[in-house]
Image: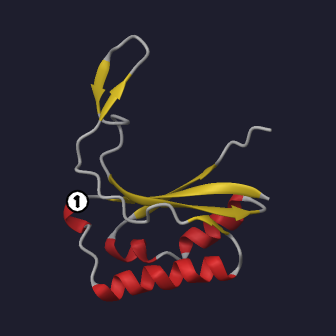
Amino acid sequence: MKEFALIFRLKDLADFKPTPEQMQERMNWLAGIASQNKLVDKGNTLLPFAGSAKTVRPDNMVTDGAYTEIKEFISGYIVVRTETIDEAVEIAKANPVFKIGGSIEVREILKRD
């Protein structure tokens, strides 16, 4: 089995105001993954960064943000365990973040033996 990080993104910090119903929907989604024994780390599914970020490079050069091309707010992450990235994508597709214009980045986690 492989592990994948599902990174939740929103277009704007203003979108980060979930209703109690939306929170329950997210919790139900997480419970469904856990019931399949595929939830490795529920991480911090709500990761309210203040919005500013800096990247420090090896030459001590400091730039704004984590990635200059990303203009989205990272709202959280979880880690799931599946056989393939396609299976992780299917899990991601069921997340309610899409109802508020969000997106999910799915990345395989490198395991070193």
| For residue 54, above or below residue 7 | above
Q: Quadrant of the C terminus?
A: top right
In the shown orientation, is residue 95 left or right of residue 23?
Answer: right
Residue at image coords 24%, 58%: 12
In the shown orientation, is residue 112 left or right of residue 68?
Answer: right
| For residue 93, above or below residue 69 | below
Q: Position of residue 84 (x, y in %)?
A: 75, 59
Q: Position of residue 60 (x, y in %)?
A: 35, 13
Closest to the observer: 75 or 87? 75
Mark 1 crowd level (few <14, some 14–19, many ≥20, 10 Å Cα): some
Residue at the far bottom: name it.
21
Closest to the observer: 59 or 10? 59
In the shown orientation, is residue 91 left or right of residue 95?
Answer: right
Residue at the far left: name it.
14
Q: Position of residue 75 (x, y in %)?
A: 36, 60
Q: Residue under circle 1?
A: 13
Residue at image coords 57%, 82%: 31
Specify the quadrant of the image occupied by residue 97.
bottom left
Q: How many marks?
A: 1
Residue at image coords 27%, 83%: 19
Closest to the observer: 71 or 57? 57
**Secondary structure of the residue carrying numbered label 1:** helix
Q: Quadrant of the N terminus?
A: bottom right
Callout 1 amino acid = Leu
